Image: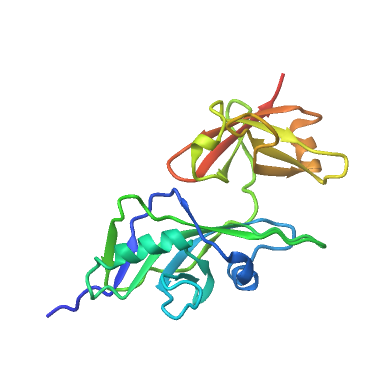
């Protein structure tokens, strides 16, 4: 008789809408997974395992998030309760549950370290694939920003990570604006927030040398072309 599947994997949607908490306590473990160099933000897509932590003295429903065998944080207290309820209905032969995860941020400069963000791709449908073997959990490390490439119409495009899971937080124009200061070494590009106030959400950066080579003195205009999931196409061209 064939053995029953031992592993479950949440159906991926590309939305990565569940944030992991407590990552600041596991910075070294996350850094060893992300492997983003000094001065470069992390961008890693990988597999995370959700492990009930029945011995946790702070939360009886605690669920650890484990990547490459290392604890990198926990499900939030409220979501951990919901998750425990969901897995209570799984067949008893499912021993491990995995989910797609994205590690972003984690920038470290010479004098400052910014925290990593880890988001999980758990679908509303809660559909789980039952597997006989665990998925290949080798991370896909992008780290940093994909170089711009020129389109036939003269604009420049690149795939970027959208920093917010809820696209309603973006301005309906999907406009992207550049910003820099005399002291910055880069020109940064920000997707406007819903209100169109402030810098918005950083989606890209160029060194000032790269910017000058492509756009001279500028300024540029940009648009974020949303797709399914959290990756989008950034389109930049010289403004009027």
Task: Answer left or right for 205 relative to 141.
Answer: right
In the displayed structure, would residue 163 be above or below residue 191? below
Looking at the image, which residue is at 34% across and 50% down? 124
In the displayed structure, would residue 167 be above or below residue 65? above
Task: Answer left or right for 213 relative to 23.
Answer: right
Task: Answer left or right for 89 relative to 41.
Answer: left
Looking at the image, which residue is at 57% across and 28% down? 152
Check the image and name the residue furthest to the right. Answer: 182
Frontmost residue, 71 versus 221: 71
Q: Could you tell me residue 228's position as x and y percent?
A: 42, 41
Q: Is residue 226 visible?
A: yes
Frontmost residue, 36 versus 122: 122
Check the image and name the residue furthest to the top. Answer: 240
Looking at the image, which residue is at 63% across and 33% down? 192
Q: Is residue 161 visible?
A: no
In the displayed structure, would residue 156 be above or below residue 12? above
Q: Could you tell me residue 60's position as x and y percent?
A: 42, 73
Check the image and name the residue furthest to the left. Answer: 1
Frontmost residue, 179 versus 165: 165
Q: Could you tell me residue 83's position as x and y percent?
A: 36, 62
Quadrant occupied by the C terminus: top right
Looking at the image, which residue is at 50% across and 35% down? 168
In the displayed structure, would residue 188 be above or below residue 130? above
| Count of all numbered marks drawn on residues in the image | 0
Splitting the image into 4 quarters, where does residue 100 fall?
Answer: bottom left
Q: Could you tell me residue 146's position as x and y percent?
A: 62, 48
């Amino acid at each position: 008789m064939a053995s029953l599947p031992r592993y479950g994997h949440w159906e991926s949607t590309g939305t990565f809408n569940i944030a992991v908490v407590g990552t600041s306590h596991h910075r070294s473990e996350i850094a060893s997974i992300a492997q983003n160099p000094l001065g470069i933000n992390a961008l890693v897509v990988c597999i995370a395992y959700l492990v009930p932590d029945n011995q946790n003295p702070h939360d009886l429903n605690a669920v650890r998030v484990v990547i490459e065998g290392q604890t990198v944080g926990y499900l939030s207290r409220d979501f951990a309760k919901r998750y425990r309820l969901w897995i209570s209905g799984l067949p008893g032969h499912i021993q491990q549950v995995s989910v797609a995860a994205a590690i972003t941020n984690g920038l470290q400069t010479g004098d400052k370290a910014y925290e990593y963000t880890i988001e999980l791709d758990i679908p509303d449908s809660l559909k789980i694939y039952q597997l006989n073997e665990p998925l290949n959990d080798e991370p896909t490390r992008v780290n940093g920003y994909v170089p711009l490439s020129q389109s036939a119409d003269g604009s420049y495009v690149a795939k970027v990570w959208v920093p917010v899971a809820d696209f309603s937080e973006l301005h309906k124009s999907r406009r992207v604006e550049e910003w820099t200061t005399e002291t910055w070494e880069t020109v940064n590009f920000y997707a406007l927030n819903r209100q169109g106030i402030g810098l918005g959400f950083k989606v890209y950066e160029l060194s000032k040398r790269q910017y000058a080579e492509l756009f001279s003195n500028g300024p540029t205009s940009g648009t974020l072309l949303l797709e399914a999931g959290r990756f989008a196409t950034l389109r930049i061209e010289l403004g009027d």
